């Protein structure tokens, strides 16, 4: 039996801002660029009380709480703090898998400090983050990754929740299926359509039926519903790609995808800012109504360095889709891939300069 | 449909149209020519849905009608027949039979009414000029068009019409080629259109260097060129071409003039040892002298020195040698002028004493 901890920093960017600027403490803080099209990167808990959430358009956040303090994100600072958090984790185990700047999985089955239980390790990590960095983190302890992640969310913020192996069977039945990894709006609706709302409902659906309805993902759903997850903690994998995709309520023609592509580009771009690595290839992914998947990609001579440049390339990739204009699509995705470390020769700007139109 | 036609007459019509037919099509009928016989004229139409070419041949009309035939096959058959041969083409049901002497070919045909037509857009601006004039404008600029760039509006050539002048502009974002014809071309309004790359390549292939007329109509969404025996219709690229006038530098205070051919040959030689990927060449200017240097990752080096007319301060600048060679290759004058400002700003290349064609080239950090 493995012992996994999921550590999730509370309102990370906003908390860093509040920590570093005492005037922001206790006030609704929204980390976002100013602008018509920008989205919220993070919101402090004070701001969340007004209904402000991450990834919401900044203009909407402003409408929800006109008194909120808007702060432009400073990812260099967040990255530095994230490294400090990582160092604390690494004192306890080498098996740390960062998901982003503010989240990580730890496998503490064998931990370096000799603490007897995973719960004690999680407490120690939270305590060290609090005293050394003046920030709070929530942690979940469970026998696998997916339950650990659910657990860290259970008592957020500044909470700890433990799911012991013997408690899994009792914990699962009431858990809403929407909490399972991979179950988003669409799968959630498809499950609801067959009367499945909780993992208990899901456990009662025969595996064969799930496989028939959801293909390979059906088997995974079946396991997840019983709290089974065999995925391992992969230490410190460098970012290879980031992407965001969206399945539509109804299939759309290419001509109507622009607003979706823009919104997804915003999301993918925000995610790409969480790593110091530089993405060089822009990818547009489409799935047709009859489930054909096509991808179009472009690697500009110099990596896209602004959201606007990234968004334009993603939009322009539509031109490379040569299917019948009548073709309808059920899904669109926008991604950035081919990441390299800064300083790598490929990441260095091409010597040829561009005309400045 | 049944016709009798001379091989050479038919081949020249097919030749002028075959370029639009792609080797792989999205629709089977796009691999075919539409043949249409009326009076004593056979019209041959090829299309890729973006561009349509219509050629004509004088024939003996034995039975009027319309049909389609596999384009490349008919073209290859016609080309393979001996010069001066006579052919008959006869359509029956879903076959077309070609006979010539003791040869006989039966080709499968697709319905003529399935053949897509571009139709003619209404309105627009019409310009009439000499074929040699249009050909020159295209030759002087088309090499700078982008190729499969995501900035799709760069994958073509801008035709910019104003009263008293016609301009052609192409750019791939690193260099820009500009050429203009200044004279009264008989229009009263201004109009711009971006013609797709493929149509420009076909058009310059179809134009000859004569004083015969060619008419160019630029309409919303479409451009049409009529070269007497051939008609080209193309969709235009729906996008905004960059403001090219902004990037044509004006205040280059360092002005070099050089013998065009001497410079071109020296660059071509140094290019051999430039970096294969970046193609950089270093230009070192000093009074009366231009030094060219290249080196590559294998540590090979080339250096050339040529006499130029230059009296400004010494300076150094890097360029993609191909961009310089492309521009020098299409100029005609004995002498060329290169205007520079500093190592970070674009260079302007043109024929000495004639700025009707201008080449803007961004430098390269070396």
Image: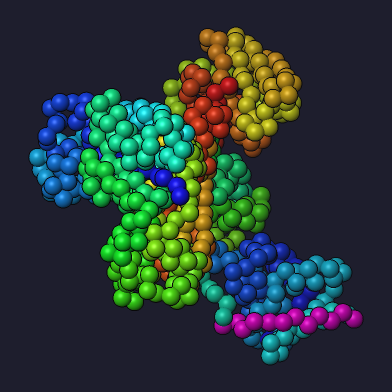
Q: In which quarter of the image is residue A139?
A: top left
Q: Residue furthest bottom?
A: B93
Res B151 seen here: no
Task: Report whether A205 appears left or right of B234.
Answer: left
Q: Position of residue B219 (x, y in %)?
A: 43, 60
Task: Report whether A85 appears left or right of B280.
Answer: left
Res A158 seen here: yes
Residue at horizontal 36 percent and vertical 49 percent from the top: A142
Q: Position of residue A348 (x, y in %)?
A: 52, 29
Residue toward you, B363 or A186: A186
Q: Position of residue B3 (x, y in %)?
A: 73, 83
Above or below: residue B350 compared with residue A48 = above
Residue toward you, B286 or B320: B320
Residue at horizontal 66 percent and vertical 15 percent from the top: B291
Confirm whether the magenta stretch covers residue B105.
yes
Task: Report whether B288 appears left or right of A322.
Answer: right
Residue at horizontal 48 percent and vertical 22 percent from the top: B344
Q: Position of residue A148 (x, y in %)?
A: 36, 49
Residue toward you, A216 or A2: A2
Confirm whether the magenta stretch covers residue B295.
no
Image mark count:
0
Above or below: residue B74 compared with residue A124 = below
Above or below: residue B277 compared with residue A204 = above
Task: Report whether B56 appears left or right of A215.
Answer: right
What is the span of residues highlighted in magenta in the rendered image?
B102-113
What colour scheme has been applied to the protein in the rendered image?
rainbow
Q: Which residue lies furthest to the right in this view?
A: B102
Residue at horizontal 46 percent and vertical 72 percent from the top: A207
Q: Quadrant of the C terminus of chain A?
A: top left
């Amino acid at each position: 039996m493995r012992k996994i901890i999921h550590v999730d920093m509370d309102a990370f960017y906003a908390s860093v801002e509040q920590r570093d600027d005492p005037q922001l403490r206790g006030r609704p803080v929204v980390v976002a660029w100013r602008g018509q099209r920008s989205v919220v990167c993070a919101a402090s808990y004070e701001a969340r009380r007004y209904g402000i959430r991450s990834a919401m358009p900044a203009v909407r956040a402003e409408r929800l709480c006109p008194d909120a303090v808007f702060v432009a994100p400073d990812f260099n600072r967040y990255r530095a703090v994230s490294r400090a958090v990582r160092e604390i984790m690494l004192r306890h185990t080498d098996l740390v898998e960062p998901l982003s700047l503010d989240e990580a999985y730890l496998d503490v089955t064998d931990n370096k400090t000799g603490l007897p239980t995973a719960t004690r390790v999680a407490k120690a990590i939270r305590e060290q983050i609090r005293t050394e960095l003046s920030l709070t983190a929530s942690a979940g302890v469970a026998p696998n990754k997916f339950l650990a992640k659910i657990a860290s969310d259970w008592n957020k913020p500044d909470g700890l929740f433990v799911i012991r192996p013997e408690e899994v069977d009792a914990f699962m039945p009431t858990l809403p299926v929407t909490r399972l990894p991979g179950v988003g709006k669409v799968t959630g609706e498809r499950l609801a359509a067959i009367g499945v709302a909780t993992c208990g409902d899901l456990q009662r659906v025969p595996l064969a039926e799930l496989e028939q309805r959801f293909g390979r993902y059906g088997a995974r759903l079946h396991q997840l519903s019983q709290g089974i997850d065999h995925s391992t903690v992969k230490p410190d994998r460098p970012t290879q790609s980031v992407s965001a995709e969206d399945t539509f309520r109804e299939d759309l023609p290419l001509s109507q995808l622009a607003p979706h592509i823009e919104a997804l580009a915003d999301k993918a771009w925000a995610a790409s800012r969480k790593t110091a690595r530089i993405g060089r290839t822009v990818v547009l992914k489409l799935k047709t109504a009859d489930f054909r998947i096509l991808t179009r990609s472009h690697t500009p001579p110099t990596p896209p360095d602004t959201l606007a440049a990234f968004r334009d390339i993603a939009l322009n990739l539509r031109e490379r889709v040569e299917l019948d204009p009548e073709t309808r699509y059920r899904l669109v995705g926008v991604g950035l891939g081919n990441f390299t470390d800064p300083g790598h020769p490929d990441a260095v700007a091409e010597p040829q300069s561009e005309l400045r139109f | 449909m049944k016709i009798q036609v001379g091989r050479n007459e038919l081949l020249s019509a097919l030749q002028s149209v075959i370029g639009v037919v792609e080797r792989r099509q999205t629709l089977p009928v796009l691999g075919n020519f539409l043949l249409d016989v009326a009076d004593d004229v056979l019209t041959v139409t090829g299309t890729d849905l973006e561009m349509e070419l219509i050629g004509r041949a004088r024939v003996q009309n034995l039975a009027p009608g319309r049909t389609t035939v596999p384009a490349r096959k008919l073209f290859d058959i016609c080309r393979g027949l001996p010069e001066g041969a006579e052919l008959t083409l006869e359509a029956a049901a879903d076959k077309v039979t070609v006979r010539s002497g003791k040869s006989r070919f039966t080709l499968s045909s697709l319905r003529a009414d399935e053949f897509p037509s571009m139709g003619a857009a209404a309105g627009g601006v019409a310009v009439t000029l000499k074929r040699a004039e249009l050909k020159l404008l295209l030759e002087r600029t088309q090499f700078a068009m982008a190729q499969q760039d995501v900035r799709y509006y760069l994958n073509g050539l801008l035709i910019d019409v104003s009263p008293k002048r016609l301009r052609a502009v192409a750019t791939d974002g690193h260099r820009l080629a500009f050429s203009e014809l200044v004279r009264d071309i008989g229009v009263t309004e201004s109009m711009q259109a971006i013609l797709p790359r493929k149509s420009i390549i076909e058009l310059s292939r179809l134009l000859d260097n004569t004083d015969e007329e060619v008419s160019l109509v630029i309409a919303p969404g479409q451009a049409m060129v009529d070269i007497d025996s051939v008609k080209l219709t193309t969709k235009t690229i729906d996008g905004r071409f960059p403001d090219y006038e902004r990037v044509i530098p004006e205040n280059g205070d360092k002005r070099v003039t050089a013998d065009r051919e001497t410079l071109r040959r020296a660059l071509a030689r140094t290019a051999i040892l430039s970096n294969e990927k970046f193609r950089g060449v270093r230009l070192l200017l000093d009074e009366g002298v231009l030094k060219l240097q290249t080196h590559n990752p294998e540590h090979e080096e080339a250096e050339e020195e040529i006499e130029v007319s230059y009296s400004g301060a010494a300076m150094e600048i890097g360029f993609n040698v191909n961009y310089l060679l492309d521009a020098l290759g299409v100029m005609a004058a004995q002498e060329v002028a290169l205007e520079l400002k500093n190592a970070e700003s674009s260079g302007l290349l043109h024929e000495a004493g004639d700025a009707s064609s201008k080449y803007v080239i961004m430098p390269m950090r070396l």
